Image (spheres, rainbow, N blue to C red):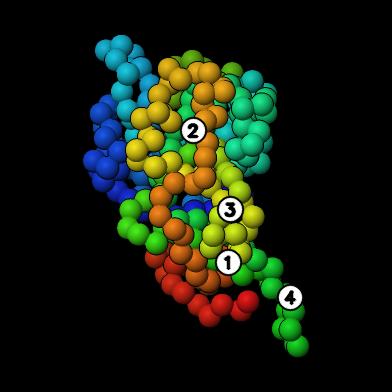
């Protein structure tokens, strides 16, 4: 799974890298070295502009943890942070969004944890690892987004609509496999146009876009257990520590 990740690329850099054409970048979104479920996250998607009627590529802020449009409330969002690539087209929570609302969630890298057994007088604990592309540049995690209407809020209240997202995961490969058996599915820049295209609504055709993670090989390093707390943040969380395994 992917339960925490790092997202520090500036909105303007994402606009330039991913050829965003619609709207202004969300300058209010600060970099985060410990993105957790229900946090606001940057996402790139394509939608028809209501004013011009043109399809535009947009950089938006979504909340991590997908809330299906038919949900009675938003309480289950923290449980739907990931969608399995193998079943994303069939699961009721994801299949509609998979056909019409695909996005990418840019990340520097992500965290996974490995249990470390107690030794001598020590206590058992979970060792966090930071996994990231060995080369420069963000990894584009394949995602889905959805809109949920809160009917307890008046129509003219900005809080009436909640925009949320989930990260699609797949079997882990190479270095990631020794830490966890799942990893985020990533999208190559060359595949970005096809992945974001909202006119591609056939689930069978869309599934052909789900393949072995794109991009460079991942690098892995042990990091401080400080990242275990969602209140911890800052670049110090990425500093390497001795690997206990």
Residue picked out by circle 4: 117
What residue is at 52 percent from the left and 36 percent from the top?
Answer: 210
Depicted 102 relative to depicted 166: above or below:
above
Between residues 182 and 223, which one lies in front from this camera angle?
A: 182
Depicted 155 relative to depicted 142: above or below:
above
Left or right? Give the position of 141 relative to 151. left
Q: Position of residue 3 (x, y in %)?
A: 58, 51
Element at label 3: loop
Sequence order check: which comes first, mark 2 or mark 1?
Answer: 1
**Are the residues flagged by discs 2 and 1 in contact, CB closer than 8 Å?**
no
Residue most toward the bottom? 120
One can see residue 27 in this view = no
Asked which quadrant contains residue 93, the reply is top right
The label number, if any, that marks residue 128 in the structure image? 1
What residue is at 46 percent from the left and 64 percent from the top?
Answer: 219
Query: How busy is the neighbourhood of tag 3: few (under 14 within 10 Å), some, or many (20 plus)?
Result: some
Residue picked out by circle 2: 209
Sequence order check: which comes first, mark 1 or mark 4?
Answer: 4
- Rounded to the nearest whole Å, what is the CA distance between mark 3 and mark 2? 17 Å
Which marked residue is nearer to the observer: mark 2 or mark 1? Answer: 2
């Amino acid at each position: 799974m992917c339960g925490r990740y790092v997202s520090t690329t500036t909105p303007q850099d994402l606009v330039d890298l991913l050829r965003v054409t619609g709207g202004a970048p969300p300058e209010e979104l600060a970099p985060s070295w410990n993105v957790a479920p229900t946090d606001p996250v940057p996402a790139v998607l394509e939608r028809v502009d209501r004013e011009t009627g043109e399809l535009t590529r947009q950089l938006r802020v979504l909340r991590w943890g997908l809330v299906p449009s038919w949900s009675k409330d938003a309480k289950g969002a923290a449980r739907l942070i990931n969608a399995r690539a193998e079943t994303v087209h069939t699961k009721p929570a994801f299949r509609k969004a998979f056909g019409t609302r695909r996005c990418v969630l840019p990340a520097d890298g992500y965290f996974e944890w490995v249990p470390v057994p107690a030794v001598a007088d020590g206590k058992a604990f979970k060792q966090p690892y930071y996994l990231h592309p060995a080369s420069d540049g963000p990894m584009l995690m394949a995602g889905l987004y959805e809109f949920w209407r809160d009917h307890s809020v008046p129509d003219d209240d900005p809080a009436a609509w909640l925009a949320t997202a989930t990260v699609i995961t797949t079997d882990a490969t190479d270095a990631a496999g020794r830490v966890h058996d799942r990893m985020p599915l990533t999208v190559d820049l060359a595949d970005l146009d096809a992945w974001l295209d909202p006119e591609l609504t056939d689930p069978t055709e869309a599934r052909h876009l789900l393949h072995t993670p794109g991009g460079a090989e991942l690098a892995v390093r042990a990091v401080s257990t400080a990242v275990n707390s969602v209140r911890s943040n800052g670049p110090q969380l990425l500093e390497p520590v001795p690997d206990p395994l």
